[in-house]
């Protein structure tokens, strides 16, 4: 009875999570949904006399693989959401048809099959206990397969390193190089800090020099640009002018330009 | 009870396949593949209990190991592709055609 | 009939044992001249003549060695080497028949070689010409000396090749090239007959050597197979000897240099057919058989056709070519009459070799003096400017029309009498042919050497150099006396008897037989008629239109037209049909198939979209279908 309740709860949750994974625009959510499914399955393994697998499932899948997925997602860009407009003609229709058809086949086959009462693993584990039995199988009958998996894992690790490795094209820039470049440049000193007024207490306010004039470059250019774009300019025209000037001085590429650049590289 | 597990396994597998077929993001496609592998594992475990034989669990274990290796390499490939193309869409890599 | 042919004796040593030298000399000459071409330009012609003469010397020595044997041992076979292992041994057969031919070929051939030195003196390719002449002689010698049909066939083909090369020697002239091709193609038809005949001989008797055939075939034996072989061999003989219906190449072959014409007509090539018939006579043309009758009929028809053609030709060489056809027709007629005819046929062949070479070379001499003009209507009154040529030509003329006591008189009348005796109808046709011969040869002589000058403005006729006239003199001596020597007291007949058989009763020289008298009378009438028309009367220097009959003769009895409409045009239709079928049918299927596959694969190609998801979809659908199939079949 307990197993039935567990099954039905976890079945609903896992199917829902699986659907959520497939139909979520954001990849991060998809990853989290997949993690949910895996956890559900781990519990189901445990219920089905497979506690070892349940542990492995949690450690390897949810622990390692899912982390790897999330890690890569962060590398690739977490905030991008996928479009759901299908570009391949007929792809979605046929995919759903094939999926449903396949499902129908499986259900038909499984539903038609007449199963004997479950044997259970008590016989198989015997007196040695579950873990011993698993170990016995793994290190006797399947020892070669086990060894080969070790070779596979090493190969995979090497392959991942080779694939993800980036060739260094230039000399590594050391701190010495950086300081030398700074003193050879036109401003050895740090940029002036922003002016912080009591009334605003904000870093987007340019500093004032002792003579009352506005210190150029005292506002970070990204902040300056944000202010210009979002119309957060101060009321004082002098300050506003200085911020605008800073924003235009070092014009960082906008999103559209970035895309154009990327496309060119791709082409 | 076996039937229930198997049908659940089938549903998860079909959902995974559907995801592979309709999602463009390579990472999500990969997740769907993982889902399909997990569905298989469920079936293995279920059958293992059904027939009273531990080997099903052993196989499921190996599937997990292989899946781990596969994910490592696959994600490395995705990262490499993304680095050069700035895109993780499987549809963008379509130069090998007629 | 008891023809009694001597057994063939194996022979080694002596001149006969080395008879292959006869073939080797000219062959080596041709080889040297062809391989070392330009380096031999200065002395090539001398080498050619020397090789031919050397061959002649060997032939003469072999001849004397041969007559040293007893009459029954005069068929000597010389084994050379194993040609086709287990099937054919190459060997030579030196017997009275082959040695007669060898002497004629090398003797007259050498004279023609010598003559060619002068005739071709101004041709820059004289060396090549001599190499071909040598090749011609070598091939012809192989043809007559081989002791089996395979060797004979190799020589036969060699002769065809050499004639092709020589007729087309001036290949820059399209007419010469076409004539060479025509000769080659027409000869192929005959070769086909010979080849198929050989096949049947092989399958029937299992051998192709004359000696073994002689053992296996009973004298006088005939049946359907033998008749077929005989007719096929006759087809081959017709091709080489320019007999009806394969006569058409001979007249066109006049495009070659005149010595070639002399060589083809007198010593080699056209005599090959007669040789084949006589050599095979004991096997496949026994007296009174259908095959022999066919030979005689072909001969009679050709002798008339040739004579008629000869009457209308204004081209001196073509006139002579017509006469060759006619004379070879006589020989074939003789060869179709059994052993009695063989001796006269061979005798006529030998004397004809002399007087025809004499006249051809004489005609060449005339052309040499007349800027290579061949139209007799542009000649006239040449006897004073070319006395030697005139005299020698005139002797040849008297010989060919059968003027009493000259060569042709004995041999040709011998054939006619034998024919009247054996095949009266054909015999009397031959008499008629002799009369026509009298007319057209007289016409030729009168138009060339008598009457008014009708020379072209730039013609300055002159006598030819000695190197050309000496051979003429020697040949005319042969034309004068050879016939009497060979025929009186049946010398040639008795000499040939071991090889070809002896007739039941020896012919007697009967100068006053009715057929002989009739022949003489008709010849005289023809000559007088020719005198009235061409000697005394003015000859128009432009060819008059002529009657229907004249046109008929001028067009070679419409032989070419017949070939054209019977074989060429249907052949062309057939090729056009084949081309059409090939283009539309075969190519259509092939190209259509290719286009269909190309098109469908071009469309199928589109399946490769490059989208991994599409591929995944197809894999998934496939997997689903497979699962379904498994469920259905395995009832899992």
Image: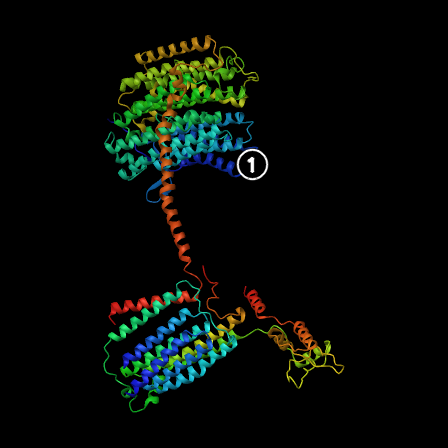
Identify residue for label 1.
C38
Relative image position of residue A213 (x, y in whole percent): 74, 79
- For disc 1, the neighbor class at 10 Å (few under 14, some 14 to 19, many from 20) is few
Displayed quadrant of residue C143: top left
Q: Nearer the viewer, residue C353 or A90?
A: A90
Mark 1: which secondary structure? helix
Residue A43 versus residue C401 in the image, above or below:
below
Q: Position of residue C523 (x, y in %)?
A: 37, 12
| Residue at the outermost right position | A211
**Quadrant in the picture for the N terminus of chain C:** top left
Position of residue C272 relative to residue C612, above or below, is above
Q: In the rendered view, does A248 fall on the left or right side of C284?
A: right
Query: The numbered mark 1 sits on a residue in which chain?
Result: C
> What residue sits 46% from the left and 32% below the top?
C165
Residue A25 quadrant: bottom left
Residue B24 in sight here: yes
C508 to A142, vertically: above or below:
above
């Amino acid at each position: 009875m307990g197993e039935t309740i567990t099954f039905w709860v976890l079945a609903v949750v896992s199917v829902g999570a699986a659907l959520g994974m497939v139909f979520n625009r954001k990849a991060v959510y998809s990853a989290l949904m997949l993690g949910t499914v895996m956890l559900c399955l781990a519990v189901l393994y445990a219920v089905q006399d497979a506690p070892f697998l349940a542990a492995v499932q949690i450690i390897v899948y949810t622990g390692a693989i899912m982390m790897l997925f999330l890690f890569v997602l962060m590398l690739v860009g977490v905030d991008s959401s996928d479009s759901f407009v299908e570009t391949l003609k007929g792809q979605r229709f046929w995919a759903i048809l094939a999926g449903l058809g396949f499902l129908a086949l499986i259900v038909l086959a499984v539903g038609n099959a007449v199963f004997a009462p479950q044997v259970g693993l008590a016989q198989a584990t015997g007196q040695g206990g579950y873990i011993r039995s698993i170990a016995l199988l793994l290190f006797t009958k399947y020892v070669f397969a086990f060894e080969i998996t070790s070779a596979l894992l090493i190969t995979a690790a090497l392959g991942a390193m080779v694939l993800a490795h980036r060739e260094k094209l230039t000399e590594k820039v050391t701190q010495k190089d950086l300081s030398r470049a700074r003193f050879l440049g036109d401003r050895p000193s740090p940029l002036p800090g922003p002016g912080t007024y009591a009334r605003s207490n904000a870093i987007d306010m340019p500093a004032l020099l002792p003579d009352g004039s506005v210190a150029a470059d005292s506002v970070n250019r990204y902040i300056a640009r944000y202010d210009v774009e979002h119309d957060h300019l101060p009321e004082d025209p002098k300050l506003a002018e200085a911020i605008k000037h800073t924003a235009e001085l070092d014009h960082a590429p906008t999103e559209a330009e970035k895309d154009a650049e990327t496309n060119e590289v791709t082409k | 009870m076996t039937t229930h597990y198997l049908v659940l396994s089938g549903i998860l597998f079909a959902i995974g396949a559907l995801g592979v077929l309709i999602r463009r993001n390579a990472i999500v496609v990969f997740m769907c593949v993982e889902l399909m592998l997990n569905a298989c594992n469920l079936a293995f475990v279920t059958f293992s209990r059904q027939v009273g034989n531990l080997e099903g669990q052993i196989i499921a274990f190996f599937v997990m190991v292989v899946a781990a290796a596969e994910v490592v390499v696959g994600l490395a490939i995705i990262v490499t592709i993304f680095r050069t193309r700035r895109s993780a869409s499987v549809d963008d890599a379509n130069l090998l055609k007629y | 009939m008891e023809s009694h042919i001597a057994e063939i004796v194996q022979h080694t040593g002596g001149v006969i044992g080395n008879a292959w030298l006869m073939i080797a000399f000219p062959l080596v000459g041709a080889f040297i001249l062809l391989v070392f071409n330009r380096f031999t330009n200065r002395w090539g012609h001398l080498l050619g003549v020397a090789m031919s003469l050397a061959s002649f010397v060997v032939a003469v020595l072999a001849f004397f060695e041969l007559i040293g044997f007893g009459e029954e041992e005069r068929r000597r076979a010389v084994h050379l080497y194993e040609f086709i292992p287990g099937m054919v041994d190459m060997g030579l057969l030196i017997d009275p028949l082959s040695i007669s031919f060898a002497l004629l070929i090398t003797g007259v051939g050498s004279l023609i070689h010598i003559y060619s030195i002068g005739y071709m003196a101004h041709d820059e390719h004289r060396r090549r010409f001599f190499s071909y002449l040598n090749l011609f002689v070598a091939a012809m010698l192989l043809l007559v000396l081989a002791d089996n049909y395979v060797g004979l066939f190799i020589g036969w083909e060699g002769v065809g090749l050499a004639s092709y090369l020589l007729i087309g020697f001036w290949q820059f002239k399209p007419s010469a090239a076409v004539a060479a091709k025509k000769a080659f193609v027409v000869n192929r038809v005959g070769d086909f007959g010979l080849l198929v005949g050989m096949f049947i001989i092989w399958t029937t008797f299992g051998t192709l050597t004359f000696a073994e055939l002689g053992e296996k075939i009973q004298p006088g034996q005939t049946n359907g197979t033998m008749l077929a072989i005989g007719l096929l061999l006759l087809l081959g003989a017709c091709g080489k000897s320019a007999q009806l219906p394969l006569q058409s190449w001979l007249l066109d072959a006049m495009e070659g240099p005149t010595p070639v014409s002399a060589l083809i007509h007198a010593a080699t090539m056209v005599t090959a057919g007669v040789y084949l018939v006589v050599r095979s006579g004991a096997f496949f043309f026994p007296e009174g058989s259908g095959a022999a009758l066919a030979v005689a009929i072909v001969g009679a028809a050709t002798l008339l056709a040739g004579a008629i053609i000869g009457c209308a030709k204004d081209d001196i060489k073509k006139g002579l070519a017509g006469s060759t056809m006619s004379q070879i027709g006589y020989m074939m007629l003789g060869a179709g009459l059994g052993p009695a005819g063989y001796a006269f046929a061979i005798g006529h062949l030998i004397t004809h070799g002399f007087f025809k070479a004499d006249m051809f070379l004489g005609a060449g001499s005339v052309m040499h003096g007349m800027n290579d003009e061949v139209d007799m209507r542009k000649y006239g009154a040449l006897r004073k400017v070319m006395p030697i040529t005139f005299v020698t030509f005139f002797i040849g003329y008297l010989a060919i029309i059968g003027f009493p006591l000259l060569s042709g008189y004995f041999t040709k009348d011998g054939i006619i009498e034998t024919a009247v005796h054996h095949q009266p109808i054909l015999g009397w046709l031959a008499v008629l042919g002799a009369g026509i011969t009298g007319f057209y040869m007289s016409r030729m002589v009168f138009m060339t050497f008598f009457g008014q000058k009708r020379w072209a403005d730039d013609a300055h006729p002159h006598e030819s150099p000695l190197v050309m006239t000496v051979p003429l003199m020697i040949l005319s001596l042969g034309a004068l006396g050879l016939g009497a020597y060979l025929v009186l007291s049946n010398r040639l007949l008795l000499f040939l008897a071991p090889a070809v058989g002896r007739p039941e009763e020896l012919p007697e020289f009967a100068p006053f037989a009715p057929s002989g008298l009739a022949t003489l009378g008709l010849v005289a009438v023809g000559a007088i008629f020719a005198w009235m028309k061409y000697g005394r009367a003015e000859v128009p220097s432009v060819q008059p239109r002529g009657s229907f009959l004249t046109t008929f003769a001028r067009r070679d009895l419409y032989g070419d037209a017949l070939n054209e409409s019977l074989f060429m045009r249907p052949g062309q239709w057939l090729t056009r049909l084949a081309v059409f079928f090939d283009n539309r049918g075969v190519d259509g299927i092939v190209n259509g198939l290719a286009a269909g596959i190309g098109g469908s694969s071009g469309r199928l190609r589109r399946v490769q979209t490059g989208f991994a998801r599409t591929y995944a979809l197809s894999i998934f659908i496939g997997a689903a279908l497979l699962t379904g199939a498994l469920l259905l079949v395995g009832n899992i």
